[in-house]
Amino acid sequence: MMSAFRSLMQEQLPPGEADLLLAALDTPPPVSIRLNPRKTANAFPGTEEVPWCPNGRYLPQRPSFTADPLFHAGAYYVQEASGMALWQLKPFLQTINAPRVLDACAAPGGKSTLLLDIMPEDGLLVSNEIIRSRVPVLAENLARWGCPNVVVSQNDPATFSGLPDYFDLIAVDAPCSGEGMFRKDPEARKEWSPAHVEFCAQRQRRILNDLWPALKPGGLLLYSTCTFNRKEDEDQVAWLCDTLGAKLILGPQKHMPHKVKGEGFFMALVAKPDGAAVAFRYPVVRPSPPPQQCPRWLRDGYTYAMKGPILKAYPKALHPAMRNLEKILNVVHSGIAVATQKGNDWIPSADLALAGDLAPGAFPRFAASPEQVLAFLRRDALVLPRETEKGYILITFRGLPLGFVKNLGLRTNNLYPPARRIVNRAVNKPT
């Protein structure tokens, strides 16, 4: 298969570049992370900045992210450097008042968390994943990022035709043949074939065609892949312009590992032609009001509502839109899960601990040592000092919240979610 790939690259790249590309694919990949500007811990100080993303950092070697509490606290996201090129969308998004943004193929969440960093705080992000098994990881990574203005959904792109002219920006990081991952993932080489390239190209056009009606007139569509060939890259942009009437705004840009310190990545930004928006009346969802005595553990600016036994919080301005989307989309999560009601007790949610708007004095805090924080992340029982007050205690590391325990005096109940716990007991303690 690699001989066929070599021939394709020799056909499509300038003379001599195919050999440079293939040689680069046999070198070790760089390691990079993107810092969360909402969380204050200084992760990896003194490291090299990614040139096209001010929050991106190259690491000299790959650490054990699993053993780093700052990763679990959402201080940074492990993201390939070339994919951080989406930072270029910031000036476009900042000019839109309360933008509605769709990340259509979002898992595991790198581009969604980046979009949250560059869009106005009054904007709404719908982070969608088609494949059901990938949704829990997406929701977990977004919870770590701590933003309340997110709806996580699991829908086929065709479902979004039920939201005509709704989004100001749609990001389509399309499923592709994965040529840009040949260096990081040897399995990607085994799966590649010219037939697979053709299959991916057809699927990409179906996705783009299905999503196009949901974009507002004059709205922006970002198309990206992690592949090199023209059929999945430049030809798709040409198809958007020739068939759907899109206008090229930015790019096309191609990051290639023999030219940049990163993996393969392609992106282009196009605009939908101006025109009259479709008149559409969106259904109104009337949420169950919370009990009067429900906790208000977040800063001001939230509307609280019950979803079954779970108390949810939504930014007041976005609450109607977020709840209305539940009538059209298969919404897995939205807003902030605050607590679960159990009799007269309210058990704080793990996502509440990670929320950027958690009120400073909402809970007593316990600053865990490296040994204690690793035990907490494994869901082991913690022994707290005798003077620690009873009740729900927020566990922190270097000032960043990680989750809750319930202190019963002689023992504690660890409330860290079982699905998120560290299962490898050979992981060394953090430094």
Image (cartoon, helix red, strand yellow):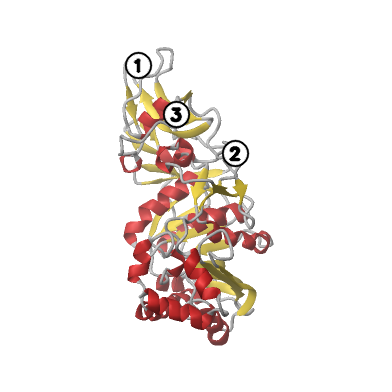
- The residue beneath circle 2 is 45
Task: Give the left or right position of residue 64, taking residue 253 as reference.
Answer: left
* Residue type, numbered disc 2: Pro
Residue where numbered disc 3 is placed: 395
Residue at the spot x=53%, y=46% of the render? 60
Distance in Å between CA atoms under marks 3 and 2 = 24 Å
* Residue 138 visible: yes
Residue at the outermost top position: 387
Comes first in the chain, label 2 or label 1: 2
The residue located at (63%, 58%) in the rendering is 52
**Which amino acid, by three-letter code, is at mark 1?**
Gly
Horizontal and vertical percent for residue 373? 41, 29
Q: Residues within 10 Å of mark 1 (few under 14, many from 20)?
A: some
Residue on which disc 1 sits: 409
* Dot 1: element: loop
Task: Say few, some or many: other residues with alpha carbon within 10 Å of mark 2 (under 14 / 14 to 19 / 20 or more).
Answer: few
